[in-house]
Image (spheres, rainbow, N blue to C red):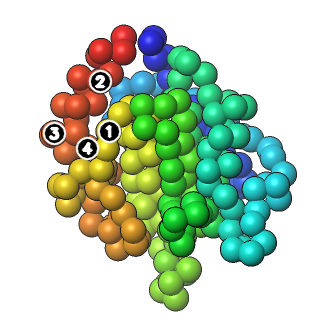
Amino acid sequence: MDLKNIVLISFGYFGKELSEIISRDVEHEFSLPVILQEGHWDLSEFYNPLRRQYDANRLLDKIDESFATINSKTIGLFNVDLFIPILTYIFGQAYLNGRCGIASVYRLSNERYGIINDDQILVNRFRKEVIHELGHTFGLIHCTNTTCVMRSSTYVEDIDQKKHFLCHKCRSVLEKNHLSQD
C-alpha cells in the first residue's frame, strides 16, 4: 500500500488551534502529511437514547464507508459521549491494521470531572488519543510501557500518565509494519 497521508476530519466545532496542534504532532509521530477536513453529519442516527451516548461501532463503520481510502489513514474527531456495548464509555476506537478510527474529546476535559478547566490538559489528552487510535490503524496493539501512547487508557488519569509518542518498542513495530506496506 502506498500511504500518502493522514486525514483528520472534525465533526462539530474544534478550535483551529486544537486541530493544528494535533495535526503537527500526528505528522511528526507518523512521518506523513496531515490533511484537516470538516465533516457535517446529523449524528442523531448514532445516538442511543437508552444509554444517552453515541454508538462508536456505527460511527467507525460510517467513517470507513464514507471517508476512508486505501492511500490514507483517517480519524474522525468528535465531541460526543462514545460507547461500545461491552464498556460504559470509550475515548476512541480504530480498526487494527485498518484505514480509520475515531476519537472524542467529550470525556477529556477536567470540567467533566468537577475540576477547573485547563485547555492545555485537554489538548494533551486529545492528542494522545488521536495518536493512540492512529497507532492501531498502523497495526499497533496496546503496550505495557506505562508512558507509551499505545498503553490502554480506561480513565483520563491513565491518559495523563502517558507521553504523546510511541515507546522504542512500538516505534520499531510501526517502522517494520509501515515499511512492509510500502
Looking at the image, which is closer to me, 176 or 19?
A: 176
Which residue carries the number 2 mark? 177
Q: Are marks 4 and 1 in contact (CB under 8 Å)?
A: yes
Residue 169: assigned label: 3
Label 1 secondary element: loop
Q: Are marks 4 and 3 in contact (CB under 8 Å)?
A: no
Q: Quadrant of the C terminus?
A: top left
Please tell me whether mark 4 or mark 1 is closer to you in this view.
1
**Dot placed on the residue nearer the N-terminal end, 2 or 1:** 1
**Measuring 70% from the left and 40% from the top, which residue is drawn there?**
62
Instruction: Determine whether, in the image, residue 13 is placed left or right of residue 107.
Output: right
Q: Are marks 2 and 1 in contact (CB under 8 Å)?
A: yes
Label 3 secondary element: helix
Whole-percent x, y for residue 18 in the image: 55, 52
Q: How crowded is the residue under tag 3: few (<14 C-alpha within 10 Å), some, or many (20+)?
A: few
Residue type of the residue flagged with mark 1 = Leu
Which residue carries the number 4 mark? 166
Which residue carries the number 1 mark? 140
Label 4 secondary element: loop
Measured in 3D between alpha carbons, the distance from the residue under mark 2 to the one under mark 1, in whole angstroms, is 9 Å
Q: Is residue 132 above or below residue 134?
A: below
**Measuring 24% from the left and 50% from the top, which residue is drawn there?**
143
Please tell me whether mark 4 or mark 2 is closer to you in this view.
2
Whole-percent x, y for residue 39 in the image: 74, 41
